[in-house]
Amino acid sequence: MGTTVAVTMKVYHAELAEAQADPALAALFACAPGATPFDRLDWLRLMADECLAPARTLIAVAREGEALAALPLVEGPGGYGALANWYSFIARPRWNDTGAAPRLMTAILRSLTRVGALSFAPLPAPEAAVLHDAARAAGWIARLGHADHNHVLHPAGRDFAAWWARRPGPLRETVRRKQRKGTVDIRIARAFDPADWDAYEAIYAQSWKPAEGSPRFLRRFAEAEGAAGRLRLGLASIDGLAVATQFWTIEDGTAFIHKLAHSPAAAMHSPGTLLSHALFAMAFDEDRVATIDFGTGDDAYKRDWMEDVRPRYRLEAAYPGTLRRWPMAGRIVAKSVLRLARPEAHG
């Protein structure tokens, strides 16, 4: 007669350095199929060091046998938030067992009631649904609302020429005319070069973009991606002077478009458009990606290049047992009465 062994659930909060020392937890946040740069532990640690310090960062963890779930967080005066910022296309919990995820995430949310407030974004729809339901099951007052748009493209077996032929006519004509003039030279680097990055920063400083939040964070990330062979740094030059740049990375069949900028003085030559044309061609025909991800934001120009839009969600939650969070709980209830946002598990 066999012996039944009871499996108990363990819930704890790990510092990021502790996560690296735990093989199972490190594997959950490793470069692996289905992961993005924003899921990796090296990204989270870099974000904590360069962008979020001195705020406390942690990973809330629940284990049940081999099943494991984890939620990366930053703690601030307003409660818990996602361990993310404007550089992050997504922020989400991770788990290795879909069937166990709801009860593991519920246990994690129960462990967070001391602070009693959570605002977590930008969440993809599947993880948003699980986190929302877990918060409610754990006794939180919770609401999902729209946070942002994510523009993506799926080549779906097409080569670049076939896809390009279906782009808007004005865009194709711009590329045809500017390429014919031969004013702009294009180069795409796969290895990190300090001179290239200096050019990127110089162009960004001239562009219409707001001041970079953490230049050191982005440089360190680019250095690491170059060492791993995932970097695609595009530079467009006129008479030897770089006038446009784009920072892409390639991971697990997805091209991520992180940053792009051009010098306004060169706008008449459309260097950014020509650079996009070259980088999309590389992603299609050389890297043969399954997805091109243009990140968050609903900028009009993205619609010329992308074909699909996915929603990103924000979970707002307050624990009613924490007295100082009652005003927040009241606001969440009021919003929920006006509009209910509960995504289906797709997208």
Image: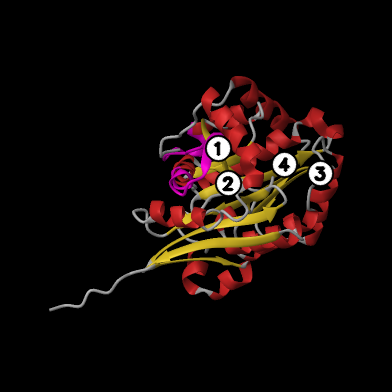
Is 131 included in the stretch rendered in magenta? no
Kind of element beneath mark 2: loop
- The mark found on residue 312 in the picture is 1
Q: Earlier in the sequence, mark 2 or mark 3?
A: 2
Kind of element beneath mark 3: helix
Residue at mark 4: 260
Q: Position of residue 29 (x, y in %)?
A: 52, 62
Q: Position of residue 301 (x, y in %)?
A: 66, 28
Residue at mark 3: 204
Amino acid identity at mark 1: Arg
Look at 53% across and 34% down and name the residue there: 311
Cβ atoms under marks 1 and 2 closer than 8 Å: yes
- The mark found on residue 90 in the picture is 2
Amino acid identity at mark 4: Leu
Kind of element beneath mark 4: strand
Q: Position of residue 53 (x, y in %)?
A: 75, 60
Between residue 31 and residue 70, name the one nearer to us.
Answer: 70
